[in-house]
Structures are given as structure tokens and as C-alpha cells.
Amino acid sequence: MKCIIALILALLVQTFHCVGQDVIFNDPFGKLYEFSLQDCSLTFLSDTRRQLTDIAYDTNGILYGIDIMGNIFILNPTDGSSSLIFTLPPLPPGSEYNSLTIDHNNILYGMGLDGNLYFYDTKDSSSGLIADLNIQAIGDMVFMDKDNLLILVSGMKLFKYNKTTSQGSI
């Protein structure tokens, strides 16, 4: 029961990323934690001193984070250091970036309350707007496979977007 309560708490607190038998997540104050699914232990990793809204690991084990302004950072989960690598376009007043994920080609995808889905390629630093999806992302995105992106949207619904066909639906 202790394990289930700890996992639920971890999921409710903020964003996370699964790595094998562990979950890495951040709180709203920049602290990174590791939750072990094997023994239900929670370990403080570091303090990034950044108010991150989401994190994502690439295929090489590099951890990225995004803040409400669209600043994307490389994070060191061991010591909390960070380096700004890119800033997404400014959002309208009252809007914020809150979702970040990465695909199998190490391309980051960022989104916020305005409905615009952006990309940043970590290999060649190219970036741009993919589409205005006319939805409000409220916190997390994940790839189902190499083409299909699931986005948590307002109303606690899942929006499925296909990168290849540019089609989306709830």
C-alpha cells in the first residue's frame, strides 16, 4: 500500500519519465526525484533551481526540461546544473508552455496552452511550428509509436496527433 500511495503522489505532484524500473520526475520548484518501482523508494536527486513544467530523456540519456516561457534546458540530474539550449516563440499573455516530449530521433516537441506544437531538433538545432492543433495542452505528451503523439488536453482528455498525416482527434 505504501508503494501505491507513493507512486500516486509522485504522479500527482508533477511530470515524470520512466526509465526501466525507475521514474524521474520534477516538482514545480525545480527539484528532481527518482522513484523506484522495485522497492518503492523515493530519492532526491538534485535541485535545478528552475521552475520546470516538464522533462524528457533522449535516447542517449540526456535529460531536457522546459519552463513556462518555452526555455529548453539540458539538465544534469546528478548536480542540478542546467544549460539553456533553445527558446520557443513567446506565447500570448496568460498562456504558458507546459508539455515536453522527445521522439526516437531525439527531436523535442513542446506545447502549451495556445495549441501550437513546436519542434526542436537536438542534432542540428533546427526548429519550427508543426501545427496549431486548436487544443490546450495541460501537462504531458508521449509518443505511442514513431508517428503518433498522445497529448493530455483540457477536460482531462487525450488528443492523438499523427505526425505523418498531420491528423488529430480526441
Image (tube, helix red, strand yellow):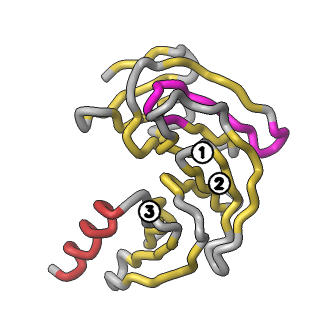
- According to the picture, the residue beneath numbered tag 3 turns out to be 28
Q: Residue at x 60, y 45 (%)?
A: 102
Q: Residues within 10 Å of mark 3 (few under 14, many from 20)?
A: some
Q: Position of residue 170 (x, y in %)?
A: 30, 23
Disc number at residue 58? Answer: 2
Of pointers 3 and 1, the one earlier in the residue sequence: 3
Q: In the rendered view, would you say 156 is above or below 19? A: above
Q: Position of residue 140 (x, y in %)?
A: 42, 45
Q: Which region of the structure is painted magenta?
A: 111-125
Q: Residue at x 57, y 79 (%)?
A: 46
- According to the picture, the residue beneath numbered tag 1 turns out to be 102
Mark 2 in CB contact with mark 1 (< 8 angstroms): yes
Residue 118's image quarter? top right
In depth, the one of 91 and 15 nearer the eye is 91
Disc number at residue 123? Answer: none
Q: Secondary structure at mark 1?
A: strand
Distance Cα–Cα, label 2 vs label 1: 6 Å
Distance Cα–Cα, label 2 vs label 3: 21 Å
Q: Residues within 10 Å of mark 2 (few under 14, many from 20)?
A: some
Of pointers 2 and 3, the one earlier in the residue sequence: 3
Q: How many marks?
A: 3
**Residue that sits furthest to the right in the current view:** 124
Residue 116 part of the magenta-drawn span: yes
**Residue that sits furthest to the front in the current view:** 93
Distance Cα–Cα, label 3 vs label 1: 20 Å
Q: Residue at x 64, y 56 (%)?
A: 64
The amino acid beneath tag 3 is Pro
Q: Position of residue 66 (x, y in %)?
A: 58, 50
